[in-house]
Image: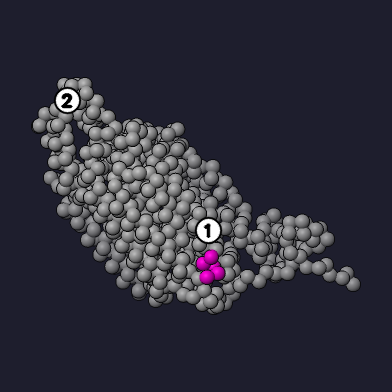
Amino acid sequence: MADSTSGTTTDSASFGRVHQDHPRYKWVALSNTTLGMTMATINASIVLISLPAIFRGIGLNPLDPANVSYLLWMLLGFLLVTAALVVTFGRLGDIYGRVRIYNAGFLVFALSSVALSLVPWDGSAGALWLIGFRAVQAVGAAMLMANSTAILTDAFPLHQRGTALGINQIAAIAGSFLGLVLGGVLSEWHWRAVFWVSVPFGVVGAIWAYLSLHEVGARHKGKLDVPGNLTFALGLGFVIAGVTYGMQPYGGAAMGWTNPWVVAALVGGVAMLVLFVVVESRVDDPMFRLSLFRIRAFSLGNLAGLMASISRGGLQFILIIWLQGIWLPRRGYSYESTPLWASIFLLPLTIGFLASGPLSGYLSDRHGSRRFAVGGALVTAVSLLGLMVLPVDFPYWAFAFLTFLNGVGSGMFSSPNASMVMNAVPAQSRGVASGMRMTFFNSGSALSIGVFFSLMVVGLANTLPGTLSGGLIAQGVPTGVADNLAALPPVGILFAAFLGINPIASLLGPSGTLASLPPANAARLTGTDFFPSLISDPFHSGLVLVFAISALMMVVAAVASWYAGVRASDELSAPDAGERLGEEPETYAPVEGEEVGELTGPLAHALRFPTAAPKDAS
């Protein structure tokens, strides 16, 4: 039966779905893709704060150097897979249908979440199960991330696209903040609940997407760029693997950057990425359309987004260590409870982001993207400089204000940045452009953890051994034992702080040293104040360096946004052929396969759908 509005043909299988030209379809698309993006990014960060409970649940000792790689791959594996595959799935969306790939992503995500919640083993086998199915979950997340932005760009008229993309981008970044809160709360109940929470949302989202979304955008015929996909995935994988193992001790060094395998992985990864650029410049149908970088708003907007992603990813990691390893224990919170309380004390960051993000998207539609992207980046830089001068043992009101300000700045920046990038590309390239943008987003998050963690370890390695040895000897620990503990790799000490574990009690207890000390000294060593006090000064030197680099990156993001942005009148002046302009048809059928008539008119009126006046029967 022909649809009375658009002239397209519908069948009984689509009866009951809101028509793609219906004025409310775009909101259906927005709500579903917002759920998908939020769910994907929540799972990227939920493990970050719940790792203490997960390690305890599967019986892994974080102070064992052999287990450090498990911890790192649980954090970085998800980000690596999404970064490597998101452009591929964006390209597949352009070829085979964005909604089709997006729907498959929900299904993969839901099934892998079930597998994660049912991990059958403890120890190393359990860790490998989690790492493997986190990678499968990341495949589903990449399908969702790559196509959600393109689906919205297809569904929304130009004058509302900034708001829609802003909400979707807010959902993506807010998910990374909400993951911290959910991880802290759920891990306090049961560590498996961290994975259970994704199951019902994945199942509901998958069913909803299959029943409600349409292929609105035109498909671009072509084939998958196999050489480009392989060189990109291998190059990025080698780089992140090199960064991961570079953070671990090697020989007598505190870190592994001199390890020949690490050097080979980094050099080989960079070489593969250079080869990838060469391949993409010569194939007929590339996965990474280098020609899009000739568009100033696209290239500079992605540069700004990459800088923001690196800055934001490292910030979350450092703030968690700061709270869980130092600030909370010094106030008497038990190490086991610090993940929950860290998530609570970080709420101002999430609130600031959620408050400013949607408003910024709404206003940027009316006044242009540039001023909001630039202003948001500068506000974020100011908040980072404030955190840099904050003492390690800070008053909470100052910390809350600065993290709230950081959230506000991030929210101001994110929506206009997404709109700036996606409005700049031709309609037929939106799938791959969306994938390219999310590649920068995920790659920045993965690299930021490696880079900032390395900076923190370097800061600790210079001062921690002497501080730790002197503090232990002052409490009556024999000099030989104290020197042996002080010689332990700083990465293990830092991970202990990150996981909310008192390493002094864990390291001195088995040797019998604690039992030989006076009770007062033993209580001091195993209490919540001794270890945080010892690492406060070495930690602060690393904090200053990390926040200074993050602030500089946000200044670069502000400059890039200034030169990428255009006036509001320009953004709304030149739609592509076939673009949705905001004019809606005069008459609607509420669902596909249903003509406008005597029954439809009253229903449409009751639902506040605009309808045309009934025609004269004569």
Residue at 44%, 72% (x, y): give it: 565
Task: Locate residue 213: give its quadrant.
Answer: bottom right
- Which amino acid type is shown beneath numbered disc 2? Thr
Residue at 61%, 72% (x, y): give it: 581
Inspect the magenta stretch and tell me whether residue 366 lies in it: yes
Q: Earlier in the sequence, mark 1 or mark 2?
A: 1
The quarter of the picture where the N terminus appears is bottom right
Foreground residue among 209 and 437: 437
Residue 385 vs 342, above or below: the answer is: below
Foreground residue among 317 and 267: 317
Inspect the magenta stretch and tell me whether residue 415 lies in it: no
Residue 306 tag number: none
- The residue at the far left in this view is 480
Please give the residue where the numbered disc 1 appears in the rendered image: 358
The quarter of the picture where the C terminus appears is bottom right
Left or right: residue 237 compared with residue 616: left
Dot 1, crowdedness within 10 Å: few (<14), some or many (≥20)?
many
Residue 576 vs 73, above or below: the answer is: below
**x and y, in percent, of residue 610 in the image:** 74, 64
How far is the residue under mark 1 from the one under mark 2?
57 Å
**x and y, in percent, of residue 413 in the image:** 44, 62
Q: Which residues are magenta?
A: 363-367
User: SS class of the residue under badge 1?
Assistant: helix
Please give the residue where the numbered disc 2 appears in the rendered image: 513
Q: Can you see residue 555?
A: yes
- Which amino acid type is shown beneath numbered disc 1? Pro
User: SS class of the residue under badge 2?
Assistant: helix
